Amino acid sequence: MDNYGNRYDDDYDNRYDGSTVVRSSGRGHSVASLTLGILGLLFLLTGMPFISLVLGIIGVILASGAKRKGCNGSMTTTGAVLSWISIVMGIIITILFFLMIAGILMFGGLFFRGAVQSIPATTAAVV
């Protein structure tokens, strides 16, 4: 089916009883994979690696489904690559986030106590 709604015989399987079955070509999975890959990168850039990770996983699953259905075009490949990038970067940023939180919880108190003790008494009274 093209952009104007015209049907092609390649997309349809006509049966003997007069019914028609539409064969899926995987193009919808390709578009969804590409869309989720782009959204995953956008969420990654806006500081939401958890959402990027989920969108990337779904995008890879959809891209592999499109390839299984025979749609091996550039849209499928681009969707898979962008989804994998959002997965890998999402994992890296998530790990760094948790390491940062752990570092603040473990060593943050030492730095804050040292900063408060180094403030002169006159300044501490004003604050």
Image (cartoon, rainbow, N blue to C red):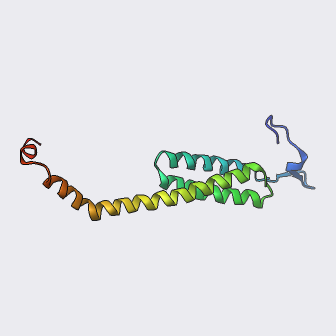
Give residue 95's position: percent from left, percent from top.
45, 62
Q: Which residue lies furthest to the right in this view?
A: 16
Q: Which of the pair 68/85 is nearer the observer?
A: 85
Residue 42: percent from left, percent from top: 54, 45
- Which quadrant of the rendered structure holds the N terminus? top right
Residue located 47% across and 57% down the image: 93
Nearer-the-camera pick, 76 or 81: 81
Q: Quadrant of residue 104?
A: bottom left
Q: Residue 105: x and y, percent?
A: 29, 62
Q: What is the quadrant of residue 88 in the picture?
A: bottom right
Q: In this view, does 94 lie to the left or right of 58?
A: left
- Quadrant location of the C terminus in the rendered image: top left
Q: In which quarter of the image is residue 111?
A: bottom left
Question: Is residue 50 at least partly visible in the picture?
Answer: yes
Q: Would you say 101 lies left or right of 113 here?
A: right
**Residue at (82% x, 39% y) in the render:** 2
Q: Nearer the viewer, residue 10 or 94?
A: 94
Can residue 29 be seen? no
Placement of 7 over or under 84, stated as above or below: above
Indicate left or right for 8 with 122 as reference: right
Q: Residue furthest top?
A: 4
In percent of width and height, residue 72 lies at: 79, 55
Q: What is the count of numbered marks?
A: 0
Residue 68 as seen in the image, left or right of residue 49: right
Question: Which residue corresponds to the image point at 90% horizontal and 47% vertical from the top-left?
Answer: 9
Q: Residue at x 33, y 62 (%)?
A: 103
Outermost residue toward the bottom in this view: 106
